[in-house]
Image (cartoon, rainbow, N blue to C red):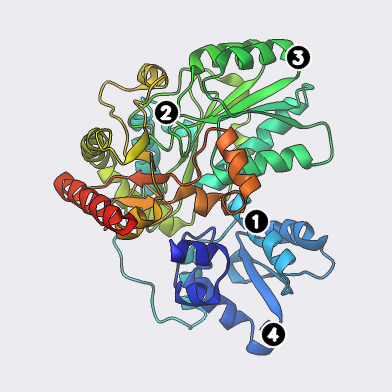
Amino acid sequence: MRSIIGYEEKDPEILQTLETGYPRFVTHPILSKLRDHFFPFRDLAGKSVWFTADLAAAREMAHVVDGHRLTEVKELPGGVGVVRHPRDPELDRRARRYLQSTGRIISSRRAVDLLVAEGVMEKPFEEELIEEESFARKTITETMGKIHGGVPAENILLAANGMNAFFETFNVLSRKQAGEGRFRWIQLGWLYTDTMTILNDFEQAPGPGKVERFYDVLGTDELLAFIKEHAGEIAGLVTECPTNPLLQTGDLESIAKAVHEAGGLMILDPTLASPYNIDVTPVADVILNSLTKFAGNGGDVLMGSVVFPAGREKTLSCKEEIAAALVSPYEKDVRRLAVEIGDYENLMADANRSAAKVIEWLLKRPEVARVYWTGQSRCAEHYARFRRPTGGVGAVFSIALKKNMRPFYDALRFPKGPSFGMQNSLVCPFMYLAHYDLVSSKEGQRFLLEKGIPFSLLRFSIGREPVEELIEALEEAFDLAAKEIS
């Protein structure tokens, strides 16, 4: 926990030891090499440098950072965009926030190939890749079509990462709905931090855009009454099924019926449980999925998908516009993901079995105040409506402890990190990493508790380790924490 807090508070001692991290949040060491090659040291003095997927993204980012006043924009070979500006905490914050929420970043594999072309690196890293990009794309889209229950491959678009998939899709669909006089979007549940950031930016942008936030996923009656009252204004609803990190599923069948009758769209993200486990095509107009999780189960590739269920004419009519807006994944990322995705179904089956056993064990532990999982009270029946015959509980769940979680977390012999859906298990103090601004203040803590979110919860993703070893590590951590507290 000391390292987590040090990272969030920009403690130099912690940051100096951090070699790499999730690519939308931590500068990849290969990008540092790219920066040092194209910008001599004298040009870096007092400057921050950022790389974008293309020149257009760099120009937009420069506008967001400071209205393009002090920022410089450049294009590198291969179409990579660069933004450089005077080093300043606020400008740095805006730049990083832009890249995090838009997903318009460049792949480390693309950066490696550029460095090889420049003679900085002798050759790319050795790894298993599918030979042909076209075949690799077909492999991914056909596999995901099958996992989504038979969606045609041509109805699946690939994006550089899951955040870019949401950002570009939401922008296109919000413009589509605005053209019909529909400006009011609904956020259902506490969602992933950058999803909420995009919705906040939409509401704060000039114009009539409005976001209504219903944090209580199970407050169906109140939500239905709101949709009925504002039927002519409803643009759509955005939610995760189940939500992150509380694993809640609401009555999406009733909600979708009301949204569709009001002329709105349902944007759903089933990533946390995985479309292998649940089928949301009956209620979704478009499905967004982070392929970084479960499909890219080696933890070494980013990608996202936009899935258009059959018969949803309004969203299908936007498919070409969305495809043009997405940052296309780099060809070597596609070729790498096509290797890993072959293990998707087997990994999910293994993770489902192990997670169910770990959850059953945790539900009996006196130290645990609550387990947040797909089978929790009041949510289980809704999740069950979407659960596939071969589906399970999912690999991800969260827990809240009755006492300070820090001794337990520090003692726990699990791999620790902010992602999920990998071959190995992961645990993280999710709210500390995603919402440290709220966790670190009394006012923020009160706000989270008002919304039913314990700020000290731990989110787990179960992988392929023997389940007996996972339970043994958990039991050991409980015992060590009890000794420290006593």
Residue 386 percent coordinates (x, y): 39, 20
Residue 52 percent coordinates (x, y): 62, 62
User: How many angstroms separate mark 4 from mark 1 (CA)?
Assistant: 22 Å
User: How many angstroms separate mark 4 from mark 3 (CA)?
Assistant: 54 Å
User: Is the C-beta separation of discs 2 and 3 under 8 Å?
Assistant: no
User: How many angstroms separate mark 4 from mark 2 (CA)?
Assistant: 52 Å
The amino acid at mark 1 is: Arg
Residue 295 percent coordinates (x, y): 35, 45
Residue 97 disc label: 1
User: Is the C-beta separation of discs 3 and 1 under 8 Å?
Assistant: no
Q: Which of 410 and 357 is in front in this view?
A: 410
User: How many angstroms separate mark 2 from mark 1 (CA)?
Assistant: 35 Å
Residue 45 disc label: 4
Task: Find disc 2 in the rendering and name its residue.
Answer: 152
Lower sequence index among marks 4 and 1:
4
Q: Label 4: state its secondary structure.
A: loop
Location of residue 100 with respect to 256 vertically, above or below: below
